[in-house]
Amino acid sequence: MIVWSIASTEEEQADGAMFLCRNAERLGTPFKWSTVIHLLIYTLEDNGLLIGKDESGAVVSAVAYTAGAEDDRYKDRARIQVHLLYIEDRWRGGAVLLAGYRALLKHLRQSQAGWREIVFYAGPTEENRRRFRKRAELLKTVQRPSGEMDFYLFVPLR
Amino acid sequence: MVTFEICSSIGQWSRFSEFYLEHRNGIIPGYQVKHALTDIKNVMRKGRAAILVNGKNEVIGIGGFTLGMEENGFENKEIAVLINSYFKEEYRGNRTFIRGLQVLAEQIKDASSEAVEVRLPTFAHNGYTNRLYGKFAGRIETKNTPYGEFHIYSASFEAFSQFCSRFK
């Protein structure tokens, strides 16, 4: 079982960031590594790094978001952009993603007053499209330095 | 046997990043994660860095520099500023640190033909680096930071490079 929480202490923030470092080549992000580091700084300023820990207390998953999104230069802080989502292989396929999604929504409701929607990038694979289009709208497919990426909008039910 | 790898791939930069974060309190006691991440971002975008790897392929140290100073928006590229270097304890006290400085001198020369000055900030209480830097550089400033006093040393690139060459 994974327990999700906001990385609020220095130690938790370091554990979360180092977990992302260890998995840097598997993150599937459209961003260069220097941009990932840059986004992590803003994520920590927005208190937006969620980490999932296993029974031993090791970080096995992480979600990083900012209040504000890249496509309007972070002007509209009611738009949340999820920049990174990574779950270790052995924990995928179960309810971990759903638990992480619920933890994110719970956290946003408690801490980001007035937030309206979530946007995120994902690789343009058929599997991702099947998974994400159930709940999110595919806004556009764009060319990034890392290749083509889909850009999604998700508006949760209130 | 320790080898120096100049960071260029995402794998090398992420290993550099992880090591810097893991040892941030050894680099500067109480150093905040977001400040360590800012250092990492700056050296990636405005400079170069190296990881030191032992025979077991473990990172045992890091070093690097930026061209230009952060407070000037990295405009003055004739000044190379060394970042916080750090080695695991068992690799200190031998020639590894000096070898690291030699690698940095080569990289500064390769990165910019304009670099004429090297600045070396160091924690005021670090006796080893203060003694070492004092051999070839002059102390030009002491800064008060939230983490304590830092001494800034300055040397011409020529003097820095010549000092490093003495140990080859």
Image (cartoon, rainbow, N blue to C red):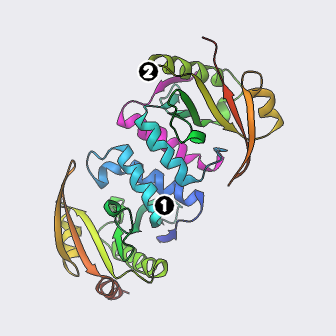
User: Which of the 4 quarters of the picture holds residue B96?
Assistant: bottom left
Q: Specify the principal SS of the magenta part.
A: helix
Residue position for label 2? A111
Residue A149 lies left or right of residue A106; in this view the side is right
Q: Is residue A70 magenta?
A: no
Residue A62 lies left or right of residue A96; in this view the side is left
Residue at figure coordinates x 60%, y 41% from the top left = A71
Residue A156 lies left or right of residue B17; in this view the side is right
Residue at figure coordinates x 45%, y 67% from the top left = B47
Numbered label tally: 2
Q: Are marks 2 and 1 on the same chain?
A: no
The percent coordinates of residue A27 (x first, y second) are 63, 44
Residue at figure coordinates x 17%, y 67% from the top left = B141
Residue range in magenta is: A1-26
Judge by depth and name the residue closer to the eye, A94 or B82.
B82
Q: Is residue A22 above or below residue B112?
A: above
Disc 2 versus disc 1: distance between alpha carbons?
A: 32 Å
Judge by depth and name the residue closer to the eye, A41 or B134.
A41
Q: Is residue A135 above or below residue B120?
A: above
- Local secondary structure at mark 2: helix
User: Which of the 4 quarters of the picture holds residue B157?
Assistant: bottom left
Judge by depth and name the residue closer to the eye, A34 or A113.
A113
The percent coordinates of residue A145 (x first, y second) are 68, 55
Residue position for label 1? B44
Which residue type carries mark 1?
Answer: Met
Within 10 Å of the Cα at label 2, are there few (<14), some (14-19), or many (20+) other Cα atoms?
few
- Which residue extends farthest right? A126
